[in-house]
Amino acid sequence: MPVTSRWSEAARALADKVTANAAEWHEAVSVTPRHLLVPRWWERIPNSPAEEWDLVAHAEDAPARLAAAYSDATLVTRVGPRHADHAKPDEKATGSPTSSSTLPGLVVSMMHRLDAEPGHKVLDVGTGSGYALALFARRLGDEHVTSVDIDPYLVEAARARLAAFGRTPRIEATDATGALPDSAYDRIMATVSVRPVPETWLRALRPDGRIVTTIAHTALLITADMGDDGVARGSVQPDPATFMETRQEADYPPRLNDVFTLARDGDGEHVRAAVGSVPDLWREWPLRWLYELDTPGVETRAARMPDGRRVLWLLAADGSWARAEEREDGAAGVVRQDGPRRLWDCFERVRRMWEERNRFSLHSMTVELDPDSGGTQTAPDGTWTLSL
């Protein structure tokens, strides 16, 4: 079977899968050659001691390349400052992802929530591989879509690869948290996470316009509509979405390894019993994200000891840290804290407030985005408001 026939068949199968609840995007997905936009990518090495990645580079017509490109999966294209396009055969990368082609199902779900129609002027924040941009341009028209990315290479590569199959939307290399290419848009969708939602986005959103984005360091996907008063109001959506945070440099700041070294075995200035159990924040993710909303910028790490006990660390750039350890006898865990802030005290306060409100679902929270005063998220009972 010719390559064109094979990828077209795969793209249609992907469209059938990911647009079941968003039929308006079926045609765009079924005719967009994602394999041309993501020729190479990085794949995480399982159980590697460091965050290591293998390069994946197949021939254009290789079945493995088409299978990956038309699967509903994220393909990581950049790790740290190293893009897969520039990697040598058998090269490995180390670090955190800094760009990717987001899984198509999530992209389509966000586009459906965005409710963009032909004639709308759309801003796509986070060009990446250009896949979401290709879908926008196909359905809405090249002239109605603008995309921005901080990385000039990503912009250059996406522009050339889109043009190869006839798509010519506007793409610019710029810091999306600053000035935007135009002053007014009907729709804004971001496949990078932010906190706060930039003032420039809100001022550029026309009345009745809509924004779909995620809050940094959480998986909270929010949709908000701009009112005539210049304030966008909406809610947290039921389906979580995790995106890389906007960045201004080639890579993200390093993790807090120096603070972790102190926290791993330190005695701590303040030692006491934990109030309640030591949670697994990778399972109790709503609690983890509420804590991030309340006490932003805290890095969370966890481990299981050989005897099965859970240990949780909270780390902050100002040198504050907390370590909570379960006891073997099942009694209340021990909490050790040090530095200028008591991070575990803040955590227990957030957990208590959440439990007092019957552990409400986070998608029941309302959102208000004000360019003059920032944004807020409010609990469903209206008595607990968290600043963005």
Image: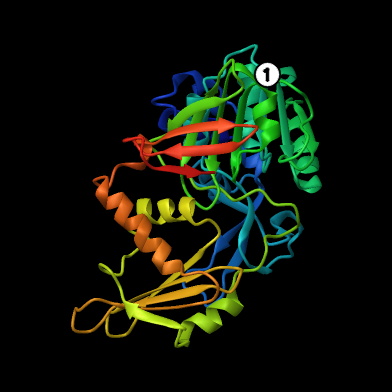
Q: Secondary structure at mark 1?
A: loop
Visual colour scheme: rainbow
Q: Amino acid at mark 1?
A: Lys
Quadrant containing the N terminus in the rendered view:
top right
Q: Is residue 313 left or right of residue 118?
A: left
Q: Residue furthest top?
A: 119
Which of the 4 image quarters holds residue 285?
Answer: bottom left
Q: Is residue 173 left or right of residue 277?
A: right
Counting from the top left corner in percent of width and height, residue 211 is at 57, 28
Whether residue 57 is visible, yes or no, is: no
In the image, residue 44 above or below residue 358: below
Q: Which residue is mark 1?
A: 121
Counting from the top left corner in percent of width and height, residue 116 is at 56, 19
Residue at point 23% right, 46% down? 358
Q: How many marks?
A: 1
In the image, residue 234 above or below residue 91: above
Q: Is residue 187 left or right of residue 323?
A: right
**Looking at this view, is 98 or 35 the one in front?**
98
Q: Is residue 276 left or right of residue 109?
A: left
**Looking at this view, is 367 or 123 the one in front?**
367
**Looking at this view, is 180 or 114 the one in front?**
180
**Looking at this view, is 24 or 97 the one in front?**
97
In the image, residue 371 above or below residue 295: above
Residue at point 50% right, 48% down? 242
Residue at point 51% right, 74% down? 48
Quadrant containing the C terminus in the rendered view:
top right
Whether residue 348 is visible, yes or no, is: yes
Counting from the top left corner in percent of width and height, residue 348 is at 35, 62
Counting from the top left corner in percent of width and height, residue 252 is at 67, 60
